[in-house]
Amino acid sequence: MKNTSTELTEMQQPNKFKLLIEKIGKRNIIIACAVVLIGAAVWMNWLLFAGNDKGGYDGYDQPSGSISDDLQNGDNADNVNSDNAYFSATQVSRQRARDEALEVLQSVVDNVDATEAMKTEALAEIAAIADEIQKEADIESLITAKGFEACVAVLNGDTASIVVKAEELQAAQIAQINAIVYEQAGIAPSGVTIIHK
């Protein structure tokens, strides 16, 4: 003879799971998953490139050339290529993270089961990412126009990380960068981190 109390609990467990999903809602679960994926992409981008002198992809985007060119230029060419590789790899990584986030959000918009509220929220996130991309591009263009050879700007809410190619930064250059970031993104100098590479 079977124990009826264990049979009831075994049969009720799937119902509890269904009730939990119904209580939370499919929409909220999808939104939570999208936010987690976006957060993971941003975290990985930050982990690989924030304050890392090697840049995560050491030598990733080095221009091709002959061996004799490299031998003639010596260590100076290695430093230049390494710095250029850092900026190129950082921009590629940032673009990949954004593409993944946009893909997740677009899948929410394209989902026929998604509610209008979910689609509206996903579209708002897409617009926010597009605005952030535009601001970063404007900041990078204006900073390079001030005489820096290369620049990468990463905006994250009310903070900004700016990496510029320079041996060292003068107070006037730091002030120029802070002014550009404030004018373009509205981020106060206290929220701006400037790194020279």
Image: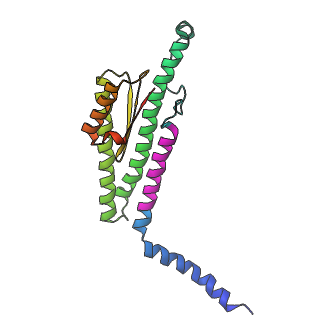
**Residue drawn at the location 49% of the way across and 75% of the way down:** 20
Looking at this view, name the residue that lies furthest to the bottom: 1
Q: Is residue 140 above or below residue 71?
A: below
Quarter of the image where the N terminus is located = bottom right
Q: Which residues are magenta?
A: 31-48
Residue 100: x, y in percent? 44, 46
Residue 141 visible to an observer of this rendering: no
Q: How many marks?
A: 0
**Residue drawn at the location 37% of the way across and 44% of the way down:** 159
Q: Is residue 40 magenta?
A: yes
Q: Is residue 18 above or below residue 43?
A: below
Q: Nearer the viewer, residue 130 or 169?
A: 169
Quick check: 178 left or right of 68?
left
Q: Is residue 194 above or below residue 116?
A: above
**Render colour scheme:** rainbow
Write down the quadrant of residue 144 in the picture: top left
Q: Is residue 83 above or below residue 76?
A: below
Residue 135: x, y in percent? 29, 39
Q: Nearer the viewer, residue 71 or 119?
A: 71
Looking at this view, name the residue that lies furthest to the front: 171
**Residue drawn at the location 54% of the way across and 25% of the way down:** 59
Write down the quadrant of residue 171 in the picture: top left
Q: Is residue 54 magenta?
A: no
Q: Nearer the viewer, residue 101 or 184?
A: 184
Write down the quadrant of residue 153 in the picture: top left
Q: Nearer the viewer, residue 64 or 50?
A: 50
Quick check: 144 left or right of 54?
left
Looking at this view, name the residue that lies furthest to the right: 1
Residue 179 visible to an observer of this rendering: yes
Residue 11: x, y in percent? 60, 83
Residue 150: x, y in percent? 38, 25
Magenta-highlighted stretch: main secondary structure? Answer: helix
